Amino acid sequence: MSALRKIVHVDMDAFYASVEQRDRPELAGRPVVVAWKGARSVVCAASYEARRFGIRSAMPALRAERLCPQAIFVPPDFPRYREVSRQVRAIFLRHTDLVEPLSLDEAYLDVTAEKTGLPTATATARTIRAAIRAETGLTASAGVAPNKFLAKIASDWRKPDGLFVIQPHEVEAFLAPLPVGRLPGVGRSTEGALAGLGFTTVGDLRRCEPRELERRFGRFGLRLAQLAVGIDESPVRPDRPRQSVSCEDTFPDDRPLAALAPALDAAAAKVWEIVRRGGRQARTVTVKLKTADFRVLTRRVTPPRPPADSGELAAVARALLDRFAEPPQTRFRLAGVGVSNFLDELAEGPQAGLFDENA
């Protein structure tokens, strides 16, 4: 592990909801849910007061209403959130040019060579958090560590409005008791597979030989072995090109599979326009469907050559519908199309992360 790097992960606290509470003082201290109210809407963000009732991002708005009948629903205002995000990023750039935004409300910063002369990454994180509070009226949590994956875990450690630092000599002791599910890339299925092998904590995972992890989990097994001891050499990449482009639509009523092609055509047209403006070519096409009972299903394919226009993209997406082996009575509330694995990224391999529910 490179102990010379100084990485900060900054994560705005309940960002969309906090902007609404800032701009509407009557919402301060109230359970605020950023979402369109209605049967087909999902939660974009929830204030910490709303989270105490179990409300979370991507939850159906109707369920949020049931959990907290007194919640105040506010429709999202993304242009306003983007403007605040630009203010926050300007603060980051005072300290380093190496800023990698992950979304409107979080970013990695490499402050190994800090522009203002602050002596430590901890001092930089404190200064950034203070500037965010003073200039935007919002709070942010930050994590400081020798690499990106540890910094992201650290930023969540003392939320909201917290700062947590993992020094290089503390890494292995800090990681040992954590559940394996805290490692990036370990979802429920992988976590279950690891538990079946007797590995429930990161400390447990260290007992397994890297070659055995590789045998069971492929290349990701080697990645797991490195993460278990705190190794992550991935750099902070400023202005990183988008790894994927996607568009999805929630229907006003649930629909059978045979009725989804027009929605895929419309989504493909929107995705194609974004890709065309960027002058890029994507090789992998993904279709996402959400059932009436909120199961999320995806299918993807990499054709022999990239789609040449929106019509070809739509045709590939429609063909993927045949790969959803659901019973005929299944109804769907959402459909989307995404593209990834851009030709300018082939050196890094296919990209994941399409249709991230928490984005």
Image: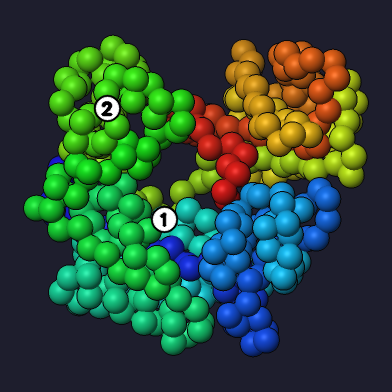
Task: Residue type at mark 2: give it.
Answer: Phe
**Circle 1 crowding by C-alpha within 10 Å: few under 14, some 14–19, many from 20:** some
Q: Colour scheme in the image?
A: rainbow
Farthest residue to the left: give it. Answer: 169
Residue indicated by mark 1:
100
Residue 317 vertical position relative to residue 19 in the rendered view, above or below: above
Q: Position of residue 145 (x, y in %)?
A: 23, 56
Q: Give residue 291's quadrant in the image.
A: top right
Q: Position of residue 323 (x, y in %)?
A: 71, 14
Label 2 element class: loop
Res. 183 in view: no
User: How many discs appear?
Assistant: 2
Q: Give residue 113's quadrant in the image.
A: bottom left
Residue at coordinates 73% horizontally, 57% vertically from top-left? 66
Label 1 element class: strand
Residue 173 vertical position relative to residue 119 in the rendered view, above or below: above
Q: Which mark is residue 199?
A: 2
Residue at coordinates 60% horizontally, 18% vertically from top-left? 302
Q: Give residue 122's quadrant in the image.
A: bottom left
Residue 51 vertical position relative to residue 146 in the rendered view, above or below: below
